[in-house]
Image (spheres, helix red, strand yellow):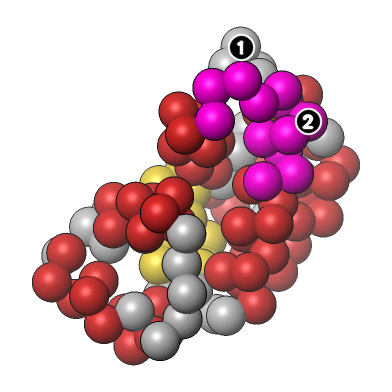
Amino acid sequence: MIPLTPLEQDILGDMAGDAHGVGELVGFIRAANPYYTNSEIFAALHALLARWIDRGWLRLHGASHSRTGLNDVGDLLPYLDRLGSDAMDPESDLPLPALDLTDQAFVDITWLRGAV
């Protein structure tokens, strides 16, 4: 069994049903850590996405390719690095892609199958 934080469980359970924008993931992190600065939120998001990308759990969702110019989820972290922590600000209008869970996420996290 892969250990997940309560925050990861919350986000993954919500993502099981539909795509979520990276901005929505920022919202989950901000709600769980209301005193985090944009830099701290960026670091938490980056770490979470890195783990999930390494595990093969994420893919880019449809139209986010055209808004961001990304072709593969492997391009996501370098893209976010270029945007920086300013993209985490609630007032930011920087384009952030949407993500879907892959089949691998449902294989690795069996309780997700019941969340759909």
Q: Which dot marks residue 42?
A: none
The residue located at (73%, 34%) in the rendering is 40
Q: Which residue is mark 2?
A: 39
Asked whether disc 1 touches disc 2, contact meaning CB atoms under 8 Å apart, the reply is no
| 99 is higher (above) or lower (below) than 25 | below
10 Å crowding of disc 1: few (<14), some (14-19), many (20+) = few
Q: Would residue 41 be counted in the magenta stretch?
A: yes
Extreme top residue here? 91
Residue 68 image point, x, y percent: 66, 44
The residue nearer to you, when weighing 96 against 84, is: 84
N-term mark: 1 or 2: 2
Q: Nearer the viewer, residue 89 or 78?
A: 89
**Numbered disc 1: secondary structure:** loop
Quarter that holds the C terminus: bottom left
Query: What residue sits 66% from the left and 26% below the top?
Result: 36
Magenta-drawn segment: 33-44
Instruction: Tell me the distance, in whole angstroms, between the alpha carbons under discs 1 and 2.
Output: 15 Å
32 and 50: which one is in front? 32
Q: At label 1, which amino acid type do we have? A: Glu
Query: Seen in the image, is 61 located left or right of residue 53?
Result: left
Left or right of 47: which side holds 114?
left
Rendered location of residue 72, percent (x, y): 65, 67
Position in image of residue 25 (x %, y %): 49, 42
Q: Residue at x 64, y 47 (%)?
A: 45
Residue at point 78% right, 30% down? 39
Let me know if residue 6 appears in the view: yes
Residue tagged by mark 1?
91
